[in-house]
Amino acid sequence: MLALGFTMLLACLSAAVGGNDADDLYQLFAVDMPPADIAVLVDASGSMGTNYAIVRKQVVDFCSSLATGENVHITVFARVYAAPLECDGAEAARRIDGHLPATPLPGEGTDIGLALHKAVEWLDRSDASSVQALFFLTDGYHQPPPDSPFGTDPQQDDDWRTLRQRGRALCKNNTLRVYGFGLGQHTDIELLRQVFDPVAVELITGKAAQVGDTLALVRKRLRAEGLRRAVAADLREGRVEVSGPQANEFMVRSVRDLAADGVQLPCTIRNQYRHLPVDVASIELRLPGASTDGAGRLSVSIADDVQRATIQAGETRDFAITATVESAPSSMHPGIREHRFPVQIVVEPVAAFPVAGAMQHLGLEAGAPRVVGGDVTAALVLRTGVAWWLIVGVVAAVVTLALVIWSATRPSKLRGTVVVTLEAGGGVQQQEVNLTRARSSRVEFRFPVAASDVAARGIDGAATQWVVESIGRGRRGRIRVTVGSRKVDFVRNKNDDKRLGDAKVEYRPF
């Protein structure tokens, strides 16, 4: 059978767009509408009769759905080729009804060769799109007028041969699909397979009322092909980039940061696909030839929430690798020591395309996203110990503080004279003590008086020992005179005299 019935065509074209509307796929992939060329050639010979009005209305309705970025070449033909409407899809929607003739063209004959020649000229223009479709409708045979360059023998005619070369070159260079719609079983739509690559041609037989649905499906297939090309280009050119430190040094503040809390190494995953989102299921970290300076073994980790994320096209996701070292060196020792821990990490994201199912509808086997980069090289630098200058400074400060405290709390040396006058043994005895000469903060002396005489005078007979001592320093310092359990204080550097029982005690500082 040379041509498909309309029902079979519907099934084939629906399968070509995966049973899914191309508009949905565009929205899913966020791909801008790619440019596309659509040529529509409608037989307007007298034999079309009432079918022409039915077909014309459906072509007009079809054009109302066209959009910017869809270039059209729409015309009718019979023995002549009417002036085509060539414009953007949005403009065609406004102009098509006024452009197509309301009734079939006058005269007899149908020049299919001339119609295909004009369509190929437009499809082969310098600014043509690489995604193209040709819809050709006729109800009869090739019946050219006598002056037509395209005779009735396509196999031998030179003009047909030239047309065939150009038509097949279009199929080879561009994504051209050709659809021949025959109204009834008696048509020459088979000529399309002689002009174009037969693989790119689909022949359909149907009724005039089915033209609109056929055009809609042809457009969906064309859009799906444009989408497939755009996504295929994205798969070829896009990638997932992983970047991190390269030969950087990270100063570690403390042994705890190195051994417990870890050091954060900043990294970035960048989705360099233009349209495709990427699911990151996990991020694997490898340590090829990991080593340290002998202080311990390096280990690395990454937060779980970073490992399960969807990164949209063109977006980035920052994350950090935590590096720790087991058995970190001691930090308590004199002198500064520098420990270096080389870090080499291979970062391998396990990623997939969340839209893989939609890509399969387009006939694309995406596989896993392409990952580039992923090598992290760095050095963790830890300085331990206490600097010698700090140790010396601390020792000097401690010694100085001790001297200050000792000096502040050590009693001052006695100065001046203390005179004690005592009535004992029926007389008066006086003892003068030169404190300056003693060069001390404490002086002891005795009276040559019997204990019984002292007791009789109200002085503790058991304590015939007198003590003069310096108490405190500075303005608050005192001179204390003690005998037994009795004592009396004098303000330093101030002449004064006081009673101590029956004894009179005088203090002369100078």
Image (spheres, rainbow, N blue to C red):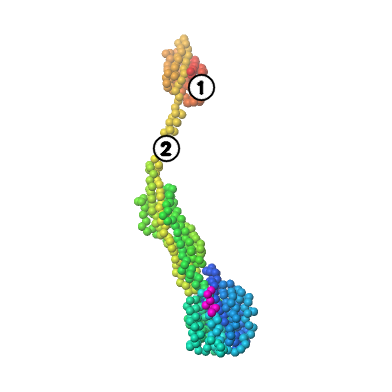
Q: In the image, is residue 487 above or below residue 265?
A: above
Q: Is residue 35 above or below residue 3?
A: above
User: Which of the numbered marks, if any, corresponds to residue 17?
Assistant: none
Which residue occupies the foreground of this view, 261 or 166? 166
Q: Position of residue 224 (x, y in %)?
A: 52, 74
User: Observer-nearest residue: 223 or 309?
Assistant: 223
The spot of residue 95 in percent (x, y) is 63, 77
Q: For mark 2, does the 10 Å Cα neighbourhood hold few (<14), some (14 to 19), or many (20 or more) residues?
A: few
| SS for callout 1 | strand
Is 455 part of what is drawn in magenta? Answer: no
The answer to whether 344 appears left or right of 57 in the picture is left
Q: Which residue is mark 1?
A: 491
Identify the residue position indicated by label 2 in the image.
393
- Judge whether residue 354 can be spotted in this image: no
Specify which label sits upstream in the sequence, 2 or 1. 2
Which region of the structure is painted magenta? 121-127
Task: Return the x and y of residue 182 as percentages of the image width and height.
Answer: 55, 85
Residue depicted at x 44% and y 19%: 436
Q: Amino acid at mark 2?
A: Gly
